[in-house]
Image (tube, grey):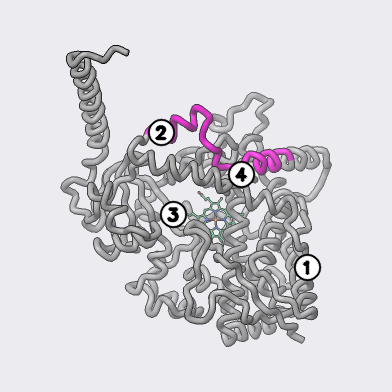
Amino acid sequence: MELPLIGELSSTACLLSTIILLLSCVYYYYLRSFFGAWDGLGVPGPKYEFFFGYSRQSKGKTWLKRLDDYFQRYGKNVASYNLERRCPRLSTCDSGLMKHIMVKDFNNFVDRGANLMTTSNIKRGLFFLDGPDWRRIRSTLSSVFSSGKLKVMTSHINRTGENLGKHLLAKATQKKLIDVKHECGHYTSELIATLSFGVNPKAVGQDDDAEFTVHTKGLINPNPGSKLILWLLDTLSYFFPFLFPLMFRLGVLPDFVTPSADRYFSSTLESAIDAKRGQTAKKHTDMLDLMMQVEVQEAQGTDAVSTATPTGRRLTHEEIIGQSKLLLFAGYETTASTFTMCLYKLAQNPEIQEKVIEEIVTEVKGDVPTYEELSQLKYTEQAINETLRFFPPLKFVERVSKEQKTYDGITIPANTHIMIHIWKVHMNPDYWADPEKFDPDRFSEENKATRDSLTFVPFGFGPRLCIGQRLAYLELKAGLVHVLKKVRVELNETTEPKAGEEMKMLDETFVTPEKGIKLAVIPRE
Ligand code: HEM
């Protein structure tokens, strides 16, 4: 074997060093292109230190805890850079600034910039849309959630609620414990299926998850293998930001939406739409019916955006399928986890549970509550709100700024990714006295009148507020009425966490207690 000559070696080394130097220069200028955005603006934060300091200072801590460290150190507004999106990032829990972003200067912060890497048409769902598409579809969907439509939905909700009440009473009579998340999940999954597209999976009362529930749970929940790949790529993309979009385009990245669940819902929805088209002169009650009323027939060659009416109320067939999938996803986990945590908190605080029962008994005259009676349940709503303050199903909401502007001395550069940290607002002692105490009276009319409304934002705020907020309250109140008319919930020696222990969640994205929640149910009469 011939050995390479010294001269050849040095020229190879020279070539390699030049390439490395060139790549470093390109990478440096690439980072500089967005890494200077906070310079001279005076907003405190780790900024450049973020790059390495993020992991070094906060070893072994979850990202929420790490962020908490930053809030402690820098205050309510923390400036850094979002390496994945290649833009400045502002993390905030400042109710004053939130008011500018979410309400006063909303037009500068319309977009959420949520880029879901998927080929599914759920991407056409309201949550993921920006700009004119978001405005058009938001105004169309608003009519689906009007008081009149919600009133009609109450009878569907009562049917499912009654079944849940009877099922829990049977468990109570048999002295069986209940897995609260399982029962509440079946309630909300049955409701969202019925209300969204008139299909009843009859989930309530079943031991196993119905096919519908399995797919709803799995829709945007990559399997552990995919999660690991996504996590690795996510970490690598801090150094090679082009990696994520490139691999997605090449089709080698796991889809964020589970393909089997996506196919299941596409075919279920297409069948439901076909069946509905075949019907003549019927009452329109579910969300799919309502969306079909404003559908633009693509077959007629009309383009939804350019032919939108002045009120912007038009939807294409593809958008209807996308909205339906999104409503399933958005409406299932959020409401199920709130119902679960509310029952848990009521079991932990029997005197508060007693007050809720008392109100239900006083206000709800018959076996099933009317829409009007549900709206009279003030204390019950206070208990739901206090649960949402403790356990907001979404930890943060996002916005992207259009132009650089200054609000109360804080300058936000253009194209900044803003993360509004709901959990930090809700647990902030500057806004809430004794935040760790569960106290529904914080939401009494008198207390509400003296509180800054931006300090309680489980559904977001302003024009991009959760569109399903009123439906969620309706489902939660009706659920509580049907359950508490039949049974009381109590802690049991198997209930986790034990008194004084912190509740651990499976991950930081959703409110899913690591060990589930088991409660005893006691018949009320
Ligand atoms: C306790 C239950 C729920 C909670 C806590 C919740 C929370 C949220 C939050 C925080 C946002 C973002 C708002 C913002 O950026 O300002 C949101 C958006 C949204 N939610 Fe909910 N949600 C719940 C139930 C529902 C239900 C039942 C539905 C529909 C069936 C729904 C549909 C949506 C949609 C479509 C959006 C996107 C709105 C837009 O971008 O215009 N949510 N939700």
Q: Amino acid at mark 3?
A: Val
Q: Nearer the viewer, mark 4 or mark 3?
A: 3
Residue at numbered disc 3:
397
| Quadrant of residue 76 within the rendered picture | bottom left
How many angstroms separate mark 3 from mark 1 (CA)? 35 Å
The prevailing secondary structure element of the residues shown in magenta is: helix
Residue at numbered disc 1:
163
Is 397 left, or right, of 266 in this rendering? left
- Span of residues in magenta: 242-267
Disc nearer the start of the sequence (2/1): 1
Q: Residues within 10 Å of mark 4 (few under 14, many from 20)?
A: many
Which of the image's four quarters has the C terminus? bottom right
How many angstroms separate mark 2 from mark 4 (CA)? 29 Å
* Residue 244 included in the magenta stretch of the image: yes
Tell me, for residue 118, which label it has, or none: none
Q: Residues within 10 Å of mark 3 (few under 14, many from 20)?
A: some
